[in-house]
Image (cartoon, grey):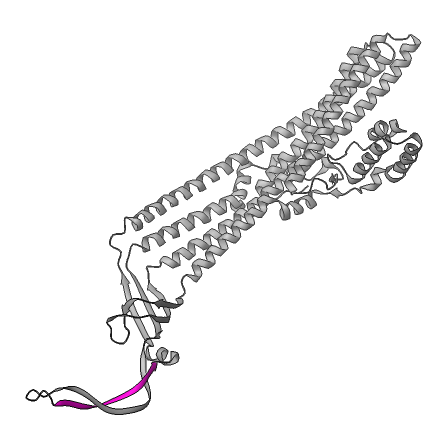
Amino acid sequence: MMFCLKFVWPCATPTKKLPFIKNWEMVLYQLIYFCQAMNKKSLAIASILALLLFGNPRNVAAQDNWTYQRALDYALSHNLTVQQSVLQKRLAELTLKQNQMARLPTLNGGASGEYRFGRNISFESNTYVNTANFSSGVSLNTGVDLFGWFTKQNTVAASKYSVYASGFLLEKARNDMGVNVANAFLQILLANEQVKISKSQVDLSMAQLENTKKLVAAGSVPESNQADLEAQLARDSSTLVAAQNTSIVNVLQMKALLNLDFAVPFVVELPENIERIPVLNLWETAPEMVYSAALASYPQYRADSMYVKAANKSLASARGAMYPNLSLSAGINTSYANTIKEGFGPVTAGTQTIGYLKNDPTSLVETASFSQARRTVPFTDQLSNNFGQSIGLSLGIPIFNGWRARGNVERAKIDVQDRQLTLDINRQRLRQDVYTAHANAVGAFQKYQAAITTERASQKAYDFATKRFNVGLMNTVEYITTQTNLFKAQIDKVSALYDYIFKIKLLEFYRDQRITL
């Protein structure tokens, strides 16, 4: 029973097992490890329990089929590169909003309070005295640019073009994701087909080996035939393992592209007939026609055009900063200090000596005096008494600012030229890509047609070789060579088919900016 659990059962698992450990596998392995430390009776009970619980792993994890459209929709929502493009578009929109709001008048308020001690200026006598006082103030100021040579308007226009460009770049990221998902999807289908062909080859080699063993036992063929077939079976098994590993790796690449958890099952849903997927007619599609269609809708080219316009507006904004600027400002303010006093209450009359007579120093000169209690002027009264307003018109004339304004203009000119060169480079690259895609599609179609012919001829040669081998007219080495040629022709045909489909779909993508499978 232990041998069945540890060696036979894993061999019976699906060949498309995903490269991660499922929960039920972990529980089963832990159970087996636990049973090894128990007696045989407990081992038998635990083994039967494990088979009842996990004997049919196919029913534990339900198949979750993924079509191309489902994979694409998931990638558009979860792929990190696409999400980054969304953030770049949002950032451009925030920059536009900020530049638009910069055209509105500014409004700023302020409040201050300070406590002074030691020798300070008295608010009453305006002289230095040793005292301590507290003062505070509030202010409200506004300002607006009346004329600045359309600097802010051009900045807003440049930001709008940048938003358009970021939108086109987001569209490009989504279109590129469609191409990448289509390529990964076809690679998975191709790997699965190669696994099927390799498995069929292994089954065929095993059947031939069993038949040869019987013939060797009967003395009809030499033992070397059996050894040759055993070596062929080992090579076919190695090819099958490599094909299965390629399938696993392709699934992992697709999951990374979708930003999908590696623990999630992923099984592609095969189209009804991959050979009948609708494709454009290569012989009626000129590369120049595809290039003209691509140029009108290619997001990268449209984004580059928007960036050129944005650079020109930024240049106009930089030039405006070199000319005078007229602005209007206004403000209100008031203050309070605890050392500002005022009299209050009844006035008391009295006399006060102010001097002596010149001729009679003993005679005092007195005058009437009046006194009144004093207090700090109330807070609200001071705010009202100290309330002030201002309005002003200012003209700023740039004369010399460390060559900053002129440097910004020169930098903006270079940016315009750089954006234009980027536009021309990407347009030239698009033309080259379209012509290359057309040539690759034609070559892939011709290679596929040749692979079909080769596969048919190899199949016919293999059928004849089988008949000759069965009657002893062909040795094992020659027969294995014919069989290997057929196997290679089948693999080449499948590879050529999927290569042709992808390359023709890539050409369609340049024309229509979308891929359908």
- Quadrant position of the C terminus in the picture: top right
Q: Nearer the viewer, residue 410 or 135?
A: 135
Where does the image place residue 427, in percent across and percent down from the top left? 48, 40
State left or right for residue 202 relative to residue 71.
right
Q: Residue at x 42, y 47 (%)?
A: 308
Q: Is residue 513 visible?
A: no
Where does the image place residue 434, in percent across and percent down from the top left? 54, 36
Residue ranking furthest to the front: 362
Instruction: State whether residue 503 is above or below residue 123.
Output: above
- Give the quarter of the image for residue 232: top right
Q: Residue 64 magenta-drawn?
A: no
Q: Nearer the viewer, residue 266 or 360?
A: 360
Q: Residue at x 20, y 88 (%)?
A: 352
Q: Is residue 371 visible?
A: yes
Q: Residue at x 71, y 32 (%)?
A: 248
- Give the quarter of the image for residue 126: bottom left
The span shown in magenta is 363-375
State left or right for residue 492 relative to residue 176.
right
Q: Residue at x 84, y 41 (%)?
A: 59
Q: Nearer the viewer, residue 118 or 197?
A: 118
